[in-house]
Amino acid sequence: MTTGTDCIIEAGTILSGLGPDGTMGLRHDAAVRVEKGMIAQIGPLEAVSYGYGDLPRFGSREMIALPGLVNGHHHFGVTPLMQGVPFAALELWLPRFRAMRAVDPRLDTLFSAIEMLESGTTTVHHIHSGLSGTPEQWTASAEAVLGAYREIGMRAGFSFMVRDRNLLAYDADETILAGLPAQTRAWIAPKLAAAMIPVGELMDFVGALRARWLTAEPDHVRINLAPANLHWCSDEALQAIAETARAGGSQIHMHLVETERQADYAKRTFGRSAVAHLKALGCLGPEMTLGHGNWMDRADLDILAECGCSVCHNASSGLRLGSGIAPVNAMRRRGIPVALGIDQSNIADDRDMTLEMKLVWALHRETGLWSEGPDAAAVLQMATEHGARTVGFGGLAGRLEPGWQADIVLMDRRRLAAPAISPRTPAAEAVLHRGGRHAIRQVFVGGRLVVDEGRVVGIDREAVMREVAAILERPETADERAAVEAAESLVAHLDAYHRARETGPSASYRYNAMADG
């Protein structure tokens, strides 16, 4: 292991990134020379190493090198399923989070960071669930999360979800609270009050956080903004967030029309789509990434293309929660950059981006003879260059070219191909369809080795796993049991609330052929 950022990395094939012609750029039997964390030179090993014989060397001609993957939409580590939270529609899933057992934010961040790094993800946009309490508590949470990413060696964008209304449902909290049993209301009301922080104070906090971390880690940290969703943010809050982002050069990542009910809310409340409303407020621009976007129509997509926005596609999340499938092919036809996010966790309940990429490729295969679905190279671009742009590292990470950060994943061709694969199989197709955590030998962030032989090297991996296990296996306390019961009471009330407002069965779930019954 090297602690420096100057080295030489050899590979039999280098996937540099998608070219303007839509094909993957390739270099064969080449090497990358890294200087101060940046790619200084790519070429034949003899040429790249000339005069640099003392640099540490990694890789071999048996390796396939690709850009570090990017998880463009992530929240926290220990998953709800691990904590016993059952799957449900989003509106009835999120309230149960309030009863989950607390996990130290550093430990929680390291747990998911291990999963990400060991499956080739070198950059993440960490969207903190939200701030509450005192400014000292806000700082402690942010510092713990960002400190954990620095400790393990990941590149990270950090934001926290901003809400200033309707924390429980699509109506005012006072309306929902009035209908709750007294005991449930007494449990949830203080939590809501602690989270209702004036948006101006949060924007000041963002400025202070940016000043500290961009000075300390200018190449590894970005401080972004995350308005939670249209029904959770007033128009004034959305405009304040947009103004703050543009003044500080930050990215914005906003959950939007994740579910059909969210799309209906916008039309009922504003008389137009959520995307059209954001445009009218002046909130759309190249700095805006919309998370999910499952319920956008053609007019919405035209607006996004016009405004230069990006979308972060969270395929596993949409399927697991029954939220919907984003119209990715229609987005790509309009030139809208699509990034990939794992959201809370993927279909295997972990943070393996190589698995998420396979799902995205398969999900958007259309039934025609000439499918417009993304090929392997396009999916890799979503998971690298497009993702890096949405996190705030556009032009720095996501490609393997001189002048870009040396975030590099080495996959062992022998493990990927076993027992054998035809030389006619394009490298991008082999990586997407046969690559995975099993094939990853080493991972570098800014030229620094962070994964060796498939395991993180910057922290005590097994100690983190033992600590997580100890927290989850500890017997439930009386207070925790009471919290679970209160959350179930809240969910029962919200279930009735949503049933009373449901407009009828959705026609969005279709079979190719419907059998009787």
Image: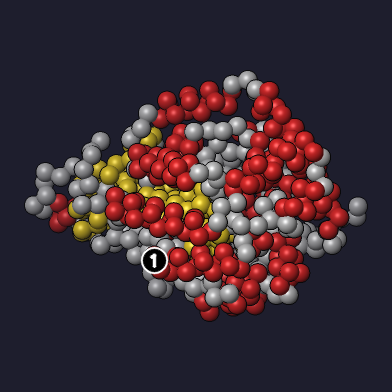
Residue placed most toward the observer, 150 or 512: 150
Residue extending furthest left?
51
Residue pictured at 43% horizontal, 48% vertical? 121
Instruction: Give x and y (percent) for residue 128.
Output: 51, 48
Tell me the amino acid under the disc marked 1.
Gly
Relative placement, left or right, of 359 versus 170 is: left
Residue placed most toward the observer, 369 or 502: 502
Relative placement, left or right, of 248 versus 185 is: left
Residue pictured at 35% horizontal, 58% vertical? 397
Residue placed most toward the observer, 374 or 206: 206
Residue placed most toward the observer, 197 or 283: 197
Number of numbered discs on residues: 1
Relative placement, left or right, of 487 versus 500 is: left
Taking 230 as reference, is 412 above or below it? above
Residue highlighted by disc 1: 249
Can you say which quadrant of the picture contains the N terminus?
Answer: top left
Instruction: Give x and y (percent) for residue 60.
Output: 27, 44
- Kindly indicate the quadrant of the structure image that contains residue 349: top right
Instruction: Give x and y (percent) for residue 35.
Output: 19, 53
Residue pictured at 63% horizontal, 75% vertical? 276
Taking 229 as reference, is 216 above or below it? above
| Res 517 seen here | yes
Taking 64 as reference, is 113 above or below it? above
Q: Secondary structure at mark 1?
A: loop
